[in-house]
Amino acid sequence: MKQVVQNYKSGELAVLDVPVPGCKPGGVLVRTAYSLISTGTELMKVSEAGMSMLGKARSRPDQVAKVMQSVATNGVPATYRKVMGKLDSYTPLGYSLCGVVEQVGAGIDDVKAGDLVACAGNEHALHAELNWVPKNLYTPVPDGLAPRHAAFGTVGSIAMQGVRQGEPQLGEVALVIGLGLIGQLVVQLLTAAGVRVVGADPDPTRCELAERLGAAACGDPASTAVEAAVAELTDGHGVDQVFLAAGGGSNQPVELAARLCRDRGRVVDIGKCRLDLPWNAYYEKELDVRFSRSYGPGRYDPAYELEGRDYPIGYVRWTERRNLACFLDLLARGSVDVEPLVSHVADFDDAVETYQSLKDGDLKAVAVLFRYPEQAEEQGESAAPEVSVPEVRRTGTTVAPVRYAKTPVRLAFVGAGNYATSMLLPHLAGREGVELSTVVTTTALSAANAQRKFGFAEATTDLDAVLGDKSIDAVFVVTRHSSHAELTRQALLAGKTVFVEKPLALSEDELADVLAAVEESGNDRLQVGFNRRFAPLLQEARKRFGARTGPASLRYLVNAGKLQHGSWYLQQGAEGSRFAGEGGHFIDTASWLLDADPVSVYATAAPGNEDLQVVLRYPDGSTATISYVTTGAAGFPKETLDLIADGRVLRLDDFVRASVYSDGTVGRKQWVSSRLPKARDKGQNAELAAFIKAVRTGGPMPVPLESLVATTSATLAVRAGLAGGAPVTLARAR
């Protein structure tokens, strides 16, 4: 098997072929799926190995003291041989992983072969394909928790033990100094415990990430921002606890802790930072200084770690293993989110290059994972390596709802928010042959406002009355994302033609419920608001581009920008991610241009923000890359698209200009839109016209239901791809 090792004398890093460890009694043999690089502890060790002998001595005075004691006892020659022999040997790296139990040793009855476990220990949870792990250093992974997330178990336990040492209580205020991997986890754990958190770190990116993950305020410790935030949150009294999660040789963290801690507050050291305590400052406030020892009680006790002797829960509530299990439980329940901390996922074979990039500063990272792809494939590692695209089933012959000829199409709107009132209703109000019948909202005032502005005949908060009104031909669902699938399901069962704004569904179960309603009712009269394929400029460009004979490459840049504070789009727990909400727009546009549905999805996220790269693969070998970014310049166009195939290029610039280039003379333009439109037309008007026509005539819906389902499934697969770190196959259900 392969294992990452380092020579401490030379600093050499290598991936070596080493023997497979035996499965001893009292433990299990685990095949690794993901292992986590501790960008603090491990990089410190890697950096030390690259130092001169004098530098190594200065960095580890504790080891120098041991050497001097050995000299006094054994003499210089013997000590020299012993020290050099130890230095000039390979040592392992790693201490946090998730993998699959391959073999169970004697005396183990809590797991079996094939179970997924999280493992800890710098001698047992190594960056290696196989590890033997004793009983008290592993714990089963809860159902549904992605292996890449479970690999954070050990560092999560370190953060959790530090938080426990601070003894936080509901309503208290804490300061976390150092917002690296451990600091970010401490912030989330404190927030989950009902503590308001202020963070301090000189890196603004880490400060921004901590605020996204729950911190009330963060800033550079050298600025006045941190002190001002503490004063505001504590009425000038100071924080109840300070957690030192910083490293390095500066004494600034302990000095800042004394200055911002309240009288008789607690200071907990979790990281490895300089601790020259300013006596007067700590004495005058009678500060309680505490140390957090790694993963929790049991650490460094051979009887606990190697022999499996547990501590009675009545005497020691939280041991290493209980902390590990508790952290995984918080992850599984969504109380802690480690996905935003993942800066990079590297193949295990690229371990040396990855460490070197981290050491050189080329790779800026909070957390880096090693992925063991062969094992992932064999054990079905990823959370969702395959997403099934549901089959659309209809009972008997599908017919359009009956409506009388020459009567206006009567519409009801469920929801009257900003999008409905700005992008849909202006195109429908006053349209010939359309009657705005009823608007339904949860608050009476918003319904009354929509009625007054757009001329609805009625305004109500009673959805059942609308669904039961046989005179209403079609229902528009324009509510918050979390309600789309259920409202669509109800409207289909009521026999209505439905226009639902994207997304159709936020989960595979919701999508299945919608399709179950189609099958039960025989009503497939459904349109999702994927309007871009109806944009006149893009329609003309596609026509000018012509038919393809070979595979195409499509690039779609979406400069989504930042959301305003307080936007309901940020409520990811209830409303899904931002991409889940609007990503279907761009997938649908790509699929329409390529005239096919995708067969696989690969997604990766930038660290510390919502930037995504989504790669779609199509049956004929075509690919579409969607770059969904929130960190771009506000003045840059929101959407730019390039379609390249057969010596031709279609270019769309934010729905204001389009062009087609053909092969032949270099730079020759075959067609360019003749003039700039007065305003961006992203196709809403044409989409609504096509929908109204389908309702009026009973003809086919503007987009086949199978296509809507395929786009929705591909959008949902992005989340699965991010969780699993591998391409997700879109398998058509049989």
Image (cartoon, helix red, strand yellow):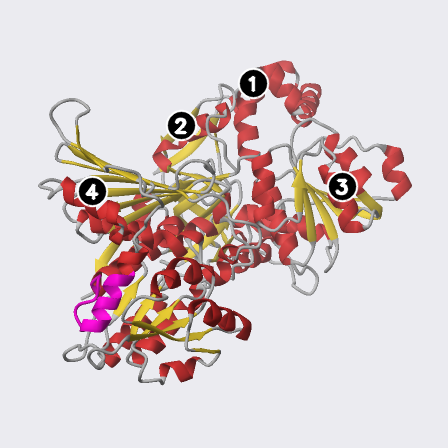
Q: Is residue 29 left or right of residue 192?
A: left
Residue at coordinates 36% horizontally, 37% vertically from top-left? 347
The amino acid marked with disc number 4 is Ala
Taking the magenta stretch, the answer to whether it contains residue 691 is yes
User: Answer yes or no: do the residues labelled 2 and 4 have beta carbons within 8 Å?
Assistant: no
Q: Foreground residue, 106 or 468?
A: 468
Q: Foreground residue, 328 or 505?
A: 505
Q: Mark 2 and mark 4: span between their CA atoms?
A: 44 Å
Q: Residue 268 has which mark?
A: none
Figure check: 212 above or below 193: above
Nearer to us of marks 4 and 3 is 4
Q: Mark 2 and mark 3: span between their CA atoms?
A: 42 Å
Classed neighbour count for the residue bearing mark 3: other residues with Cα under 10 Å, few (<14), some (14–19), many (≥20) = few
Classed neighbour count for the residue bearing mark 4: other residues with Cα under 10 Å, few (<14), some (14–19), many (≥20) = many
Q: Secondary structure at mark 4?
A: helix
Nearer to us of marks 3 and 1 is 3
User: Answer yes or no: do the residues labelled 2 and 1 have beta carbons within 8 Å?
Assistant: no
The amino acid marked with disc number 2 is Glu
User: Which residue does the numbered mark 2 point to in the structure image?
Assistant: 353
User: Which residue does the numbered mark 1 point to in the structure image?
Assistant: 51
Figure check: 162 above or below 107: above
Q: Is residue 678 left or right of residue 519?
A: right
Nearer to us of marks 1 and 4 is 4
Magenta residues span 688-704
The percent coordinates of residue 450 (x first, y second) are 47, 69
Nearer to us of marks 2 and 4 is 4
User: Which residue does the numbered mark 3 point to in the structure image?
Assistant: 228
The amino acid marked with disc number 1 is Met
- Of label 2 and label 4, which has the lower sequence position? 2
